[in-house]
């Protein structure tokens, strides 16, 4: 075989500010033209590996290394970040944050501008890559005029303009809705075919990346490589679940039906899955058995009602149009739709941050239109996507107590409430800790606690699990489920299909400011039209059920969820 | 967000927008020098009229920049007030004559000369502020960096300034979001509370805002370095436009204004035009 383009040789790394090394004894070779997926939970060291390859380590983040890392035959830390960037092009996770130029064309040109390429030559180079990633008609657009998927294309074009040998993607799917994510994976595949560059994708969302084939998967845990094998072989083993990575849903379903996953089945893609007739029968038998357990939900009293709601920031364009729905006590509902469909605006209207043009919102039958933000806040809590945008006190106790300090509550009662809330949220042992000592998931809990302390009847969460790996995702969602079981009504804005499917029986679908559907989550994902309108994608369970001759994919999906909730994980 | 952000680029089609960033930068610098140097009323009146014309041509509406304009007006008023409080007779010394209109109290008399001095001072500011605002509102931030580099400023400085300008709307949007979420936790910023409480409350918004801005800076600087920013002493510019006929005309015009300004101002050996003697 050829010489590797990237070669880690017994490599270890410890960040300056950290007590423990982040990487231990890494041995990894990546060859020209390969497609490699590096998977692992947050904190497993997978992003650190990426930063070593592109030179952010040691040139932007310093620390101590052991062993050797060769990039294109040269020792990485004796090179420079600029020299490395000629070989390795990096697409970062944050689609907005890495947009440097003010227009698409300018952003793509950024790297060649720094190389002092004359303007006319530069324009030709930009046009060429823009065509390759299919963004050539948007060269004049500003970042905020683009969708998340389009921004991702621009980032990709911006690193490809230099004709690099390695393309490195750091969690490319984190900020994208499912359909845009799928298109990104397809695009990466096309680029791979056309340029022959090696592709390294760092992601924990395995099923989404595997939409197009990968040569191998490197699985990381606690700074070590614990598996480095072809995709099929890894999927057949038990590595994934043991290390907090979610395996593709269709494989989980097969396991539930008692089928052992085998390399020869071609488990890497649901379309290529080879099942014997006996195995198909096993799935069918499991399905028939589970069907009996599906329960329909009971209606409870009405809590929140939205009636003929219209809203627009300008008079010509309506952001929301004629929205009607009712939420009942104790429900847990997903609000889904592509970016800009009006989901966040709806939340802002319910919380009173914005005033509707017409229509009204009722809580327990009472019209809220006269209430101020503050008055509504006591009954409707709003949790922002990023906990760092909400936390404003250094200490956990103070942060949770903050909302209560605004009223005239006696100190004793206040103390009691904060304690209770901290206990509910599992934060009581940390009550005297500084917020900065917490993990992202724990910070999220703090923000939820700071809202719960006001004892609202409804909690609205904006993308509660965005950017979280399976482990943290489960932690946050199980906590919300627990709150829901305690009687809190929960609304979630999301484009995570797994979240919607597994935790919320009901989903409200938005597209371009209009409400398209209000139905069960399983139904949404099995209705091709809704899936398209909301920029979601159908689950692999749909394909699997078809392959097994089950003609009610929606019921099959519901069986899967019911079973998963019953059996636990 | 539909609200037009304060102090940021406003995209419109106008003659002013069509000029290259370099032209506008030269114009802005020459114009500021011209109005700073002179106290000559005749020149100031001319410049004032011209700046009104430019404002019209730019198709920027007063309400687009009303907030900053209001702020400038407040500062101007304060400035005038303090100048009068500290030296109510400054104009008299300057114009070497004294025409008392009426007396307020003690040493505070109102003289025609002092009023004339204030008028000139005010006109100087009124000449510069709209042009400065126009410069910001009509110059594409990316072109701005290119034009700074074009007149010899280091591209690192140019790029930092243009990035800062560019993030103003983003930061404003974020401030808006954070403040809404904080209001939902009972933090009132609307002015019903006492000043001290309000100041304490605004920390609740500023802290998360600062932290998230720092985060943003880290991401963008990583992204820039990964794509070779700072590799060479010079760089080329995708968005730099070539000077066209109109650009040269405008540059010539503003230089003419500057020359006339200097000539008229210093012809008689004084920066002040004195109608009193």
Image (spheres, coloured by chain):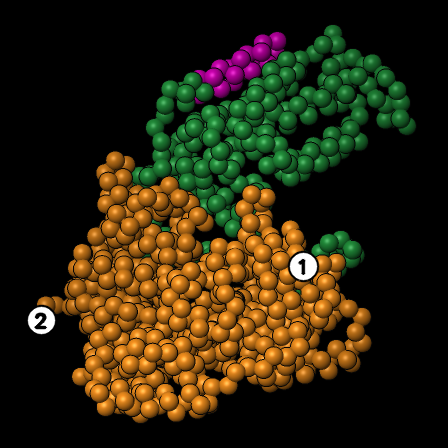
Q: Which label sits on residue B190?
A: none
Sequence-first disc among 2 and 1: 2
Q: Badge 1: few (under 14), some or many (20 or more) residues near its Cα, within 10 Å?
A: many
Q: Drawn colour of chain B?
A: green
Residue in the picture at 69% in, 33% down: B73
Residue occupying the point 9% across, 71% down: A1
Residue A20 visible, this angle: no
Task: Give left or right: position of A344 versus B18.
Answer: right
Magenta stretch encompasses residue B258: yes
Q: Quadrant of the C terminus of chain A?
A: bottom left
Q: Kindly report the distance in space between the C-alpha atoms of the residues bearing marks 2 and 1.
A: 68 Å
Q: Which chain is orange?
A: A
State the residue lying farthest toward the top: B277
Residue A415 position, x and y percent, is 73, 80
Q: Quadrant of residue A362?
A: bottom right
Query: Would you say residue B97 sits in the magenta stretch?
Result: no
Near-viewer residue (A455 or B233): A455
Percent of width and height locating residue A319: 55, 52
User: Any mark on residue A1, and which?
Assistant: 2
Q: Secondary structure at mark 1?
A: strand
> Pointer 1: what residue?
A360
B19 on left or right of A549? right
Q: Say whether residue A80 is left or right of residue B45.
A: left
């Amino acid at each position: 075989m050829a010489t590797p383009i990237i070669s880690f040789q017994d490599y270890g790394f410890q960040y300056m500010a950290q007590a423990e090394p982040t990487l231990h004894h890494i041995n990894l070779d990546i060859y020209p033209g390969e497609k490699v997926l590096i998977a692992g939970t947050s904190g497993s060291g997978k992003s650190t590996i990426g930063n070593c390859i592109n030179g952010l380590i040691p040139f932007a983040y310093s620390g101590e290394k052991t062993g050797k890392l060769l990039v294109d035959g040269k020792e990485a830390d004796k090179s420079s970040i600029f020299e490395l960037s000629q070989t390795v092009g990096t697409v970062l996770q944050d689609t907005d944050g890495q947009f440097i130029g003010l227009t698409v064309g300018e952003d793509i040109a950024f790297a060649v501008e720094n190389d002092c390429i004359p303007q006319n030559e530069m324009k030709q180079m930009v046009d060429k890559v823009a065509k390759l990633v299919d963004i050539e008609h948007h060269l004049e657009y500003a970042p905020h005029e683009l969708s998340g998927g389009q921004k991702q294309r621009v980032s990709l074009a911006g690193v490809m303009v230099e004709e690099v040998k390695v393309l490195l993607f750091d969690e490319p799917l984190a900020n994208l809705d499912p359909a845009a994510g799928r298109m990104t994976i397809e695009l990466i595949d096309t680029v791979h075919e056309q340029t022959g560059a090696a592709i390294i994708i760092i992601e924990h969302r395995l099923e989404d990346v595997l939409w197009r084939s990968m040569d191998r998967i490197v699985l990381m845990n606690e700074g070590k490589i614990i598996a480095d094998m072809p995709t099929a072989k890894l999927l057949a083993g038990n590595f994934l679940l043991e290390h907090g990575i979610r395996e593709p849903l269709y494989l989980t379903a097969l396991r539930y039906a008692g089928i052992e996953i085998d390399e020869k089945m071609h488990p890497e893609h649901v379309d290529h899955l080879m099942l014997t007739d006996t195995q198909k029968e096993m799935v069918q038998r499991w399905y028939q058995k589970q069907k009996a357990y599906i329960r329909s939900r009971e209606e409870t009293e009405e809590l929140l009602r939205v009636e003929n709601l219209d809203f627009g920031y300008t008079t010509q364009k309506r952001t929301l149009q004629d929205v009607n729905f009712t939420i009942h006590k104790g429900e847990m509902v997903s609000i889904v739709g592509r970016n800009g469909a009006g989901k966040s605006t709806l939340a802002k209207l319910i919380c009173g941050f914005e005033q509707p043009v017409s229509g009204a919102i009722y809580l327990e039958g009472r019209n809220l239109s006269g209430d101020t933000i503050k008055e509504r806040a006591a009954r409707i809590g709003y949790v922002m996507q990023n906990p760092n945008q909400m936390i404003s006190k250094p200490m956990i106790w103070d942060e949770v107590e903050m909302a209560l300090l605004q009223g005239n509550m006696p100190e004793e009662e206040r103390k009691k409430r904060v304690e209770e809330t901290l206990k509910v949220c599992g934060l009581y042992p940390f009550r005297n800790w500084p917020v900065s000592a917490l993990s992202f998931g724990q910070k999220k809990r703090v923000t939820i606690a700071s809202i719960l302390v006001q004892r609202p009847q409804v909690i609205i969460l904006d993308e509660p699990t965005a950017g979280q790996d399976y482990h943290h995702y489960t932690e946050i969602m199980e906590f919300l489920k627990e709150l829901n079981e305690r009687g809190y009504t929960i609304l979630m804005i999301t484009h995570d299909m797994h979240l919607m499917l597994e935790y919320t029986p009901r989903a409200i679908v938005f597209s371009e400011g209009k409400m398209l559907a209000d139905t069960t989550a399983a139904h949404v994902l099995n209705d091709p039209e809704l899936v398209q309108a909301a920029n979601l994608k159908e689950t692999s369970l749909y394909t699997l059920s078809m392959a097994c001759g089950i003609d009610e994919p929606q019921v099959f999906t519901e069986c899967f969820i019911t079973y998963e909730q019953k059996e636990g994980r | 967000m539909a609200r037009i952000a304060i102090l940021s680029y406003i995209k419109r089609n106008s003659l002013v927008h069509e000029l290259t960033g370099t032209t506008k930068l030269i114009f802005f610098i020459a114009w500021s020098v011209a109005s700073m140097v002179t106290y000559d009323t005749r020149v100031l009146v001319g410049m004032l009229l011209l700046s009104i014309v430019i404002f019209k041509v730019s198709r920027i509406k007063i309400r687009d920049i009303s907030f900053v304009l209001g702020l400038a007006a407040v500062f101007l008023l304060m400035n005038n007030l303090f100048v009068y409080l500290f030296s109510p007779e400054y104009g008299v010394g300057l114009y070497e004559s004294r025409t008392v209109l009426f007396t307020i109290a003690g040493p505070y008399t109102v003289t025609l000369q002092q009023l004339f001095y204030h008028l000139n001072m005010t006109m100087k500011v009124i000449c510069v502020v709209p042009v400065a605002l126009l410069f910001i509102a009509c110059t594409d931030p990316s072109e701005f960096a290119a034009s700074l580099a074009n007149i010899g400023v280091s591209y690192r400085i140019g790029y930092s300034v243009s990035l800062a300008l560019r993030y103003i709307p983003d930061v404003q949007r974020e401030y808006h979001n954070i403040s809404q979420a904080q209001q939902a936790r009972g933090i009132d910023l609307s002015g019903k509370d006492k000043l001290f409480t309000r100041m304490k409350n605004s920390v609740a918004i500023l802290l998360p805002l600062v932290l998230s801005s720092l985060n943003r800076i880290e991401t963008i600087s990583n992204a820039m370095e990964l794509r070779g920013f700072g590799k060479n002493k010079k760089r080329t510019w995708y968005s730099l436009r070539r000077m066209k006929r109109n650009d040269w005309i405008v540059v010539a015009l503003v230089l003419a204004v500057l020359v006339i300004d200097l000539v008229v101002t210093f012809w008689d050996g004084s920066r002040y035009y004195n109608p009193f003697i």
